Amino acid sequence: MMIEEGVSSPQLLPVAAFDLVVFGAAGDLALRKLIPALFHRWRDGQIPTTSRIVGASRTKLDDDGYRALARQSFEEFYPNERDDDTEWQEFSALLFYVKLDALDQNSDWAALGAKLENSEDRQRIFYLALPPDLYGDVCSNIEQEGLKSPGARIVLEKPIGRDLASAHAVNDAVGTVFAEQKIFRIDHYLGKETVQNLIVLRFMNSLFEPVWNANAIDHVEITVSESIGAGGRAAYYDSAGALRDMVQNHLLQLLCLVAMEPPFDLDPDTVRDEKIKVLRALRPVTQENVRDASVRGQYGAGAVSGEAVPGYVVEVGGQTDTETFVALKSHIDNWRWKGVPFYLRTGKRMRERRSEIIIQFKDVAHALFSASSDVLQPARLVIRLQPDEGVKLLLVTKDPGPGGMRLRYVPLNLSYADAFAARYPDAYERLLIAVVRGDLALFMRRDEVEAAWGWVDAILAAWQRDKTPVHLYAAGTDGPAQAAMLLDRDGRAWFDGV
Ligand code: BG6
């Protein structure tokens, strides 16, 4: 389906025709995520047909070559959507390609300029699907080559740097070319349907807010477990590790949305102001408490979904003590969360792919059914981000029938699959359209990124000084035993489903 410029179906917010330049267009992110996301938005009728998507990279291709590469990747990553031949042909008309070394001023910038001719008055977006140390130079080349049209926007992929100092440098360099309001820093978790729903769940249901604090909540768990390994990204991953790759961004963003104060409106800066207060209130991990507050792990050989998989050192091709798993215990030192631990955990090659937030409520003040309720935790809220998206409120309930008072958990269950028929757009679909619309709410502001790095840097420094070991765990498990002990010491256990 196509739409005419500026027209959209009723449930879609219309956007005007735009030009999007993707640097790193032949790379994994562009081919696996960005182009398919654009195709899906176009097919749903949200992208006007006169828009242009111009890929740029050092790979030698022409327009048709890039169209063929994009199509081939799409078929590989979306095997169920192979039959959409006519639609792909039509969509391909929006795709163009320029062979360009974005770091080299002698490269063919004129060719890129030619692709963008006569479009200064429409929204122009540059997407840097490139390593972060290139961001500054590419921005300055965009400006020097005269391609930065008035109002042009820039999209930066995570990671922004690899510590606070490098993030600062990247932000400074990009900031000399683009104003903060024109910079869209991606954390794709913010584009996920269920993550967006966190704000709605918390602030549009009046039953939650009165109990969303230390009076009623015992602790919070945030788990992002993955079944995939480092695989083809081993070189990048080994220089990053789970703390930099996942905690600095995705897990801390989830923590912010769970813990922040109610914003007074939905203006992007109002929400981001609340999130940064959480980051600033996070208690630092120090050399003194690092072993009580963190666990590092690395997967060995094992089996995931019944399939034997090699250990991380084999994938990387040599000994390394990079962590592929991390568990953290953190506190938010403010009034609302006094004494409530937030346990965070993420790892690769774990038992299953599962992202979940658990709000564990406190014990009732006086237990009437002490004998049977001893075995049950009090009520808990399980927010399942992926897969099987949904929200479950696990309530302690009487098992029906004779034989005394037997208690068990019964979920009040909101399953997205049962409740909503619509296809959920991939996070990148939502984020790309948000950039076109200029909606900064789903993107990280400079101070957020830097505050998150500040907290993570302290952990990295403590690990280094303490020589915190990485504990081996078998692929296909819930991580090292030490992660269970992190909670066990507090008389708690990770919630891994009922
Ligand atoms: C990326 C990380 O940001 O998020 C990857 O770099 C990770 O290592 C990915 O696999 C997880 O994203 P998702 O959407 O599959 O949960």
Image (spheres, rainbow, N blue to C red):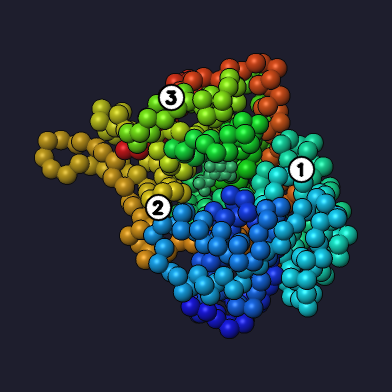
- The nearer-to-camera label among 1 and 2 is 1
Disc ID at residue 390:
2
87 versus 418 height, above or below? below
- Compare residues 190 and 392 and report the one nearer the observer: 190
Which residue in the structure is indicated by mark 3? 301
Mark 1 vs mark 3, CA separation in Å: 33 Å
Classify residue 127 by image quadrant: bottom right
Amino acid type of the residue that numbered disc 2 sits on in the rendered structure: Gly
Residue 443: image location, x then y, percent: 66, 55
Residue 333 visible (yes or no): no
Residue 354 visible (yes or no): yes
- The nearer-to-camera label among 2 and 3 is 3
Quick one: label 1 or label 3, which is nearer the N terminus? Answer: 1
Which residue in the structure is indicated by mark 1? 133
Tag 3: Cα neighbours inside 10 Å, few (<14), some, or many (≥20)? Answer: some
226 versus 122 height, above or below? above
Count of residue discs: 3
Amino acid type of the residue that numbered disc 1 sits on in the rendered structure: Asp
Instruction: Please give the name of the residue rendered at 64% of the width and 66% of the height, measured from the top-left corner.
Output: 63
468 versus 5 height, above or below? above
